[in-house]
Image (cartoon, rainbow, N blue to C red):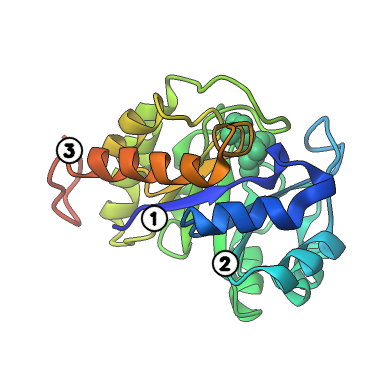
């Protein structure tokens, strides 16, 4: 599974999003992660489809929209229309998850399901075969700059085992508190896509920061234990 680095614009200067994204792009960003918050599901507010539309105009990097909102079905079509390439929804707020995943796919986008730190991986059991990616939150959603929750490492390992068991090679995305230090363990555990806010945009040189994270992730990926697809983890 190839490593993808997804800088999160939440940590960027919102008055200079275009140049922030351009720097991340020069550093080799694979995805641009956009955190959408509604003040209900999480205690914070951020951006909506108009911002995604503007970003899509200035970047060729796929836009990865992380919906931390209630009733995400209501807004999925407008994010798709605005130029999102991937959309993840939180399992904690979606009533008919199978339907929501189908909706995102029917619009031609990649469908992801996100889990809060306290949400058990078993909540994904019945849709594990259908998802294009799984987003394992490694902090409680709502804010950038938080500390990586250590237990997430074993959760990523268990999530990989679940996906392997159902024969789905879908990548695991991790989000929250990932930096040069925390990246190695989570990649060895099975994370493929790395969201990074503070560790990219709060660095002096975001372009170099993306390269540093990629190098660390790729080195860690070579230390993953060999996984036999379809085999249950011991
Ligand atoms: C938190 C967001 C994250 C956030 C990560 O709710 O989902 O994407 O931007 O920020 P850092 O990398 O600073 O923890
Ligand atoms: Zn996010």
Q: Are marks 2 and 3 in contact (CB under 8 Å)?
A: no
Task: Give the crowd class for mark 1: few <14, some 14-19, many >=20 residues within 10 Å.
Answer: many
Q: Position of residue 47 (x, y in %)?
A: 83, 50
Dot 3 or dot 1: first in sequence order is 1
Q: Quadrant of ligand 2?
A: top right
Number of numbered discs overlaid on the protein picture: 3
| Vertical order, 100 against 201 (above or below) | below
| Vertical order, 82 against 139 (above or below) | below
Q: Is residue 91 visible?
A: yes
Q: Residue 61: which numbered mark, if any?
A: 2
Mark 3 or 1: in front is 3
Q: Residue 91: which numbered mark, if any?
A: none
Q: Residue 223: which numbered mark, if any?
A: 3
Residue located beneath label 1 in the image:
171
Dot 1 or dot 2: first in sequence order is 2
User: Helix, strand or loop at disc 3?
Assistant: loop
The answer for how far apart the CA atoms under marks 1 and 2 are is 18 Å
Given residues 210 and 172, the one toward you in this image is 210
Q: Is residue 65 visible?
A: no
């Amino acid at each position: 599974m190839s490593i993808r680095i997804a800088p999160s614009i939440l940590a960027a200067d919102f008055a200079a999003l275009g140049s922030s994204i351009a720097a991340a792009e020069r550093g080799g960003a694979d995805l641009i992660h956009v955190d959408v918050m509604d003040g209900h599901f999480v205690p914070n507010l951020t951006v909506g489809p108009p911002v995604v539309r503007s970003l899509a105009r200035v970047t060729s990097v796929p836009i990865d929209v992380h919906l931390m909102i209630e009733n995400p079905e209501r807004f999925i079509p407008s994010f798709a229309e605005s130029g999102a390439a991937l959309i993840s929804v939180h399992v904690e707020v979606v009533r008919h998850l199978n339907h929501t995943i189908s909706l995102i796919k029917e619009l031609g986008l990649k469908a992801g399901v996100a889990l809060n730190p306290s949400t058990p991986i078993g909540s994904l059991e019945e849709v594990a075969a259908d998802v294009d990616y799984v987003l394992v939150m490694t902090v409680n959603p709502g804010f950038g700059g938080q500390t990586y929750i250590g237990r997430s490492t074993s959760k990523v390992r268990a999530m990989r085992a679940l996906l392997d068991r159902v024969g789905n090679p879908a990548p695991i995305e991790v989000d929250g508190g990932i930096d040069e230090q925390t990246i190695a363990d989570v990649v060895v555990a099975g994370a493929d896509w790395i969201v990074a806010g503070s560790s990219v945009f709060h660095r002096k040189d975001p372009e170099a920061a993306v390269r540093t994270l990629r190098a660390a992730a790729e080195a860690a990926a070579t230390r993953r234990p060999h996984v036999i697809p379809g085999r249950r983890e011991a």
